[in-house]
Amino acid sequence: MSSINSTDVYRPSLLQNLLLLFQRPSRLQIAALCQRHRNGKREVLMVTSRTTRRWILPKGWPIVSLRAHRTAAIEAFEEAGVIGRARKKPFASFQSYKGGEGGLKLRTRVLVYLVDVESTTDAFPERGERDVRWLSIEEAVRIAEDPGLVQVLRKLARLPG
């Protein structure tokens, strides 16, 4: 059995400690990449954020009592009226920023789940607060401003039909 001595313990430098004080940890968000087939082509759903009106995926903070894929399905319904089945395994993830009050931006890690859409409804909680649009993947790539989201959409485009 070996023992640990003082030389075995990692000690960050003063500079590393200072950097840690000013570094914000990433916060996790769960996103729904909703897809459907129309006229033989795959379409994806994009919504606008409520504050900046950027085109994004429906997403939100994790719900502690639920598995992440269920949170994705709930976000899809609440933000866009999507009724569908979220796949259990994450499809992708990316780093992003969430705009906050007064221009504060929080760094986030977005975990993306594919949602196979069964139907949609016009009666959903955030109706009137967001624009909702079904687009080809190419159109979605064109309007998405977040580089991480663009990469996720391009990954989806590479999947078979």
Image (spheres, helix red, strand yellow):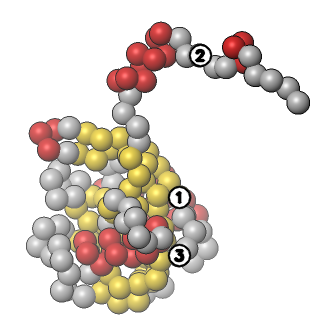
Q: Secondary structure at mark 3?
A: loop
Name the residue nearer the viewer: 152 or 61: 61
Q: Secondary structure at mark 2?
A: loop
Residue 134, image x and y in percent?
Answer: 31, 74
Q: Which residue is mark 3?
A: 87
- Identified by mark 1, the residue type is Ala
Name the residue nearer the viewer: 3 or 149: 3
Q: Which residue is mark 1?
A: 92
- Whichever of callouts 3 and 1 sits on the residue coming sooner in the sequence is 3
Residue 42, image x and y in percent?
Answer: 46, 77
- Cα gap from disc 3 to disc 1, whole angstroms: 12 Å
Q: Which image quadrant is residue 133 in?
A: bottom left
Q: Which residue is mark 2?
A: 11
Q: Which image quadrant is residue 73 in?
A: bottom left
- Cα gap from disc 1 to disc 2, whole angstroms: 34 Å
Residue at the location (30% across, 41% down)? 106
Residue at the location (16% across, 59% down)? 50
Side (left or right) of 77 relative to 101: right
Residue at the location (26% across, 81% down)? 81
- Whichever of callouts 3 and 2 sits on the residue coming sooner in the sequence is 2
Residue 87, image x and y in percent?
Answer: 53, 76
- Cα gap from disc 3 to disc 2, whole angstroms: 42 Å
Callout 3 crowding tier (Cα within 10 Å): few <14, some 14–19, many ≥20: some
Side (left or right) of 6 relative to 140: right
